Image (cartoon, grey):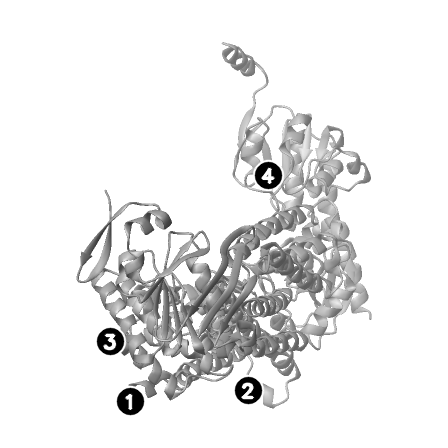
Amino acid sequence: MLALLLATFACRAPEASRSADDLGRPVTLPPQVQHIVTLSPNITEMLFALGAQSKLIGADDNSNFPPPARQLPKVGTMQPNIEKIAALHPDIVFASSEGNSPNLGPALAAVNIPLYVVRTDRLNEIAPAMDRLGRMVDAPQRESAVHGLERAIAAQRRTRTHAPRVLFVVWTDPLYVAGSNTFTDDLYALTGAANAVEADGWPQYSLESLAAHPPDLLLYPRGSVTRAQIDVLLARAARLQPRIVDVDDDIFQRPGPRVAQAAAALNAILDAFASR
Amino acid sequence: MLELANVSYAYGDAAAVREVTLRVDQRQLVALAGPNGSGKSTLLKLVARVFAAQSGEVSLDGKTIAQWPAKEYARQVGYLPQDPDPAFPMRAIDVVVSGRAPYSTRFAWETDEDWREAERALALCDAAHLADRYFDEMSGGERKRVFLARVLAGTPRLILLDEPLAALDVSHMQQFSALLREIVDRTGASVLFASHDLNWAAAYSDRMLIMDRGTLALDATPAEVMRPEVMRTYFGFDVEAVTAGGRSWVVPKI
Amino acid sequence: MRYSTRLPRASLVRPLLLLTLILAITIGMAVSFGATPLSWRALMDGDETARAILLRIRLPRVLLASAIGATLAVAGVTFQTLLRNPLADPFILGVSGGAACGAAISTALGFSRIPGLVPVVAFLGALGATAAVFLLARRRDHTDPARLLISGLVLNALFSALILISFAMSKQSDLTAALRWMMGTLFGASWTSVALVTSLLVVAFVVLVFIANDLRLLAFGEDDARSRGVNVERVKLIGFVGASIVTGAAVAVSGIIGFVGLLVPHLIRMIWRRDFRFLLPLCALGGAALLVGADVVSRVIVRDVELPVGAFTAILGVPFFLSLLRRGR
C-alpha cells in the first residue's frame, strides 16, 4: 500500500530519466542533482571548475584540489566506504573510468544511489566529459568552463621540427611507463613531442626496449618516484643520458581541467630542451 | 650382547618404560609381547638409539650406547619401525641398499659390495623379484619384506622389529616368521620383535618378554607364558589353553 | 652381474647430461631472444647499444633466472624431503609470506622510494618468519614436521592479512611496488643480484651435498634415520635454515615466483624416481631451465612489454606435469 502510494508520488514528481553512463552501464539519473559525492579527484576538479562545488557533499581521499576540496567529507579511495556515502544521502555518485571497482555500482544500487562513471581516458574526452557533467548537475558556469578548457588546450598546440622523444615513468621497478593510446600520449601529440614508447596503454616496459629506443627526455612524477630511483633505473638500462625532469603528479596524472596546465608545463620543458 | 639396566623413559609426564632390566644374548629369537601401550615400541626405540634412556643404561657388548660411535652402533643394530615408508616413490632395490648407509661415508655412493648385500638380503626375504618394482606399487606384505631386507642388508647382529607381522596375511606371517628363525640360525644374530599376536609370538620365539604398563613383567619361555592365569594377569582376558603340534596356543573365551 | 648396472653414480650421468643440455639450449635461446633483436654482426662491429643490451641487461637477467630457478627447485626438494611431504614448497614455512609482508609494510611506509631498502626488509621478513615458524614448531627437544606445516600455514594467513592491510593503506603508486613482490619479476637483474643469489645458492648447495645422505635417510622417517646414526635434529635445522635463507634471498630479489619449487622436484621425481642425492643436482638444473624458459617467453610474447614470469612457469610446467601424470606408471 505504502509502496503504491510512493509509486504514485514518484510519478507525479519531475521524471527520473533512464540513461546510460560513459561505460554503457544503465543509470537512472535523478531529476535534479543537488547532492554529489565524487570518487575521483579529476571529477572533483571538474565540478569546481564548473562552479558546482556547492553541490559537492563528499569526495574521495585523494581529492585535494582546489584547496576547499580538502574540507569535504572523505569517503575512502578505490574501495570507498559505502556506509559513509549512504549517510551523506547524495543524489548521485560520480566516478572516473580508471580505478573504480566493478562491485561499486551494485553496492551503491543496494542503497538506491545511482553511480555514473565518467570516461576521461583520453585528452579529447575531458572537455566533453566536463560538458556532460555540467548538464547533469545543471552547473551555472558550464559553457564558459568547457569553452575555456577547450581554448586553453588548443592554445598549447605546437608543431616542432624535431620532435623530442619523451618517456613518462610511472614506476621504476618494475618499469611502468605511459604508452600509446593514453592521455599522456595525447599530451605529447598536442605539444609536438613523440612518445619514446610504442607499446599500448600503461605497460610493464622492457629494459631492453628502453635501451634500444633511448628517450631524449625523461619525465617522472615527483610525488611518487624519486630521483634516486630514476638514477638506479638509468644505470640498469645502460648508456642512457636523457634530460630528466620531475613534474607534478596531480597535474600530469589527472585528466581534469588542469590538463592545459600540464600541456603548458610540457611545452616549457620541450622549449627548454630545444634551446639547450 | 645387549644389556638394559634400570632403563626408564617418559613422554613428558607419561612414563612409557620403567626400570627395565634385561639381557639378550646371541642367537636368540625374543618376542616382546604385551597389551597396546605397554611400552614395547618405546623399549625397542631405546635400544635402536631413536631415544636416549632418561635413566639407566643400554649397553651393547659391554659398551653403553653413548660410548658407541653412532654409525658403528647402527652397523650392529638394525631397526624396523612399525610403519616404514620411503615417503617418495623409489625402487625396492634402492630402499634396500639404503640399509647399507652405516657402512659408507658422507659423500660415498654405494659400492659393489653394498649392491651385493642388498640383493642377497632381498633374496633372503624371498623378494628378489621385487628389486626393480616401485615401492608405491607393492602390497603391504611385499613392502614388509622389502623393509626387512633393508634391515638385513646392514648385516646387523641385533635385529629390532616393531610389529613385523602386522599387515601380513597368514601365509606371509608364516613365511616371515620362519625367515626370522632362519636368520637367527644362519647368521647367529639375535632378533627382538614386538608383537601383539601372542600365538605367533610364542610359536616363533625362544623367549618371551611380557611388558605391562612400562615394566618388564615376565621373562619366560613361550610354554610358561601361554597359560590362562598369565593371560588373565597381564592381558586382562580369559583364555583357554590348547595344545597342538607340541605347542601351547591360547584361544580367547567368547 | 645385475647390480653393476645399478651404480647410482653411473645412472646419474645421463640425467645430468640431459638436463645440462636442456639448460644450455634454454639459456642459448634466452640470450638470443629479447625485446630487441640483436645481430651477432652488430655485436662484433662494436655496436655499443647492442653490447649494452646483451651484457648489462639480457645476460644478467638470464643468469639471474637460472640462479633463482635453481634456488627455488633446490629449496623445494629440500623442504619436501625434510617434511616428508610432496606438497611442500619453498614458501610453505612462511618464507614468502614473511618476505612479501616485509616488502608490503615497508612499501606502505614509503620505503620503496629508497632504492635497495625494500629487498633488505623483505629478506629480514623471510628470516623472521622462518625463525618464528621454527620456534612455534619446537616441542621439548625436537621439531615436529606436522607442527612446522601448521605453523607455516597459520603464519602465512597472518601475513596475507597484514599484506592486505598494507595494500589498503598504500598510495596508488606504491601498490605497484608492493605488487612486485607478490607477482614476482626478474626485472632489473644486475650483475650484483646475480652474484648475490648465485653465491648463496652455491653455499646452500654445498651444505646440502654435505647432508644429502642424511636427508636421503630422513625420507624414511625420523625414527628410522635416528636408528641409522643420523643426527636428525641437526640435519633438520641445517636443511630448514639453509633452504629458508636461499629462498629468502631469491624472494628479496625477484619476489614470489610460484610453481618452480613445487613443480620441478615433482617432474624430476616422476621421471627418475630416485633418492635425494639424485634429485638435488637434477632439481637445480631443471629449476634453472624452467625459469629461464618461462622468463624468455614472458619477455618476448608481447613486444616491448614484460608479462608476469610466474604465470609462465605454470603455463610451461603444468602441461608437462599433466602428461606425465596421465602416462603415470
> SS for tag 1?
loop
> Which label sits in the foreground, 2 or 1?
1
Q: Nearer the viewer, mark 1 or mark 4?
A: 1
User: Would residue C260 be visible to someone looking at this image?
Assistant: no
Q: Quadrant for residue B167, please give it.
A: bottom left
Vertical position of residue B204 compared to residue C164: above or below: below
Tell me, yes or no, if residue C31 can be seen here: yes
**Residue labelled with disc 2:** C40
Q: Are marks 2 and 3 in contact (CB under 8 Å)?
A: no
Query: Counting other residues with Cα less than 10 Å from the Cα at mark 4, is it few (<14), some (14-19), or many (20 or more)?
Result: many
Disc 4: host chain: A
Q: Report which residue position mark 1 lands on.
A: C1
Q: Which of pointers 2 and 1 lies earlier in the amino acid sequence? A: 1
Q: Residue type at mark 2?
A: Trp
Residue picked out by circle 3: B129
Rendered-image quadrant of the N terminus of chain B: bottom left
Helix, strand or loop at label 2? It is: helix
Label 4's element? Answer: strand
- Write down the chain letter for disc 1: C
The residue identified by callout 4 is A117
Residue kind at label 4, given as amino acid type: Val
Q: Are marks 1 and 4 on the same chain?
A: no
Q: CA distance from mark 3 to mark 4?
A: 74 Å
Can you say which quadrant of the picture contains the C terminus of chain B? Answer: top left
